[in-house]
Image (cartoon, grey):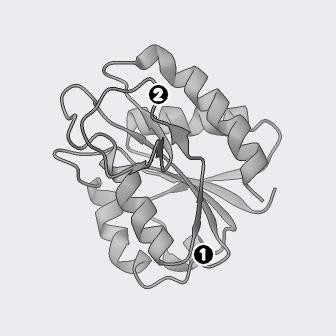
Amino acid sequence: MKKTAIVFSFHTNKTRKIAEKIREEFGKASIDMVNAEEITPKQFLSYDNLILGASTWFDGELPNFWDEFVPAMEDLDMKGKTVAIFGNGDQKEYPDNFVDAIGILADLLESRGASIVGMTPLTGYTFTRSRAQRGDRFAGLPLDWENQPRQNSPRVKAWVEQLKKELP
């Protein structure tokens, strides 16, 4: 596998747990853990594969640490980069913007030329609307700690197996 990083805020408990589980599921692969709150555009572009973690905040917003990096991302040439995105959301309390952060990041990175991998089926989720929805799939891995915490580990495991085939 090419040079890969999992990028997330080191100050987020649930996202950090998932990032660690993803890295563990990859086994012997060398994957860097990078703090999204400190990443620079040069460092971001130094990776061929990026696995990004972002919870959806409030009514469909990115967390502040991603918001601060988005302006830099809008100027990056992401052609040749492969990106997978995972995110936390609450499908019962926020059914109208479930895991919107995944969709926001996917839209931005696709517009900059990145290839998005790790699409997952909508099956098993109950929501009204999501910016992460692409037809009958999500543009990444949605997780719901509040309503489906027992599904997180099996979903991560299956997603990593999928990524092992899709990441160059």
**In this view of the protein, which residue sits in the foreground, 53 or 109?**
109
Counting from the top left corner in percent of width and height, residue 91 is at 28, 30
C-alpha span from label 1 to label 2: 33 Å
Counting from the top left corner in percent of width and height, residue 105 is at 41, 61
Q: Secondary structure at mark 1?
A: helix
Tell whether 111 sits left or right of 45: left
Query: Residue at position x 59%, y 31% from top?
Result: 156
Could you tell which of marks 1 and 2 lies nearer the N-terminus?
Answer: 1
Per the rendering, the mark at residue 23 is: none
Tell whether 61 sits left or right of 112: left
Query: Residue at position x 59%, y 21% from top?
Result: 154
In the rendered image, the vertical position of residue 151 relative to residue 120, given as above or below: above
Residue, disc 1: 45
**In this view of the protein, which residue sits in the foreground, 100 or 70?**
100
Tell me the quarter of the image containing the N terminus. bottom right
Check whether the beta carbons of the residues at disc 1 and disc 2 lie within 8 A of each other: no
Counting from the top left corner in percent of width and height, residue 92 is at 23, 25
Query: Residue at position x 57%, y 22% from top?
Result: 153
Q: Residues within 10 Å of mark 2 (few under 14, many from 20)?
A: few
Tell whether 77 sits left or right of 4: left
Residue, disc 2: 123
Q: Is residue 37 visible?
A: no
Q: Is residue 59 visible?
A: yes
* Residue 56 location, quadrant: top left
Disc 1 or disc 2, which is closer to the eye?
2
Counting from the top left corner in percent of width and height, residue 89 is at 32, 36
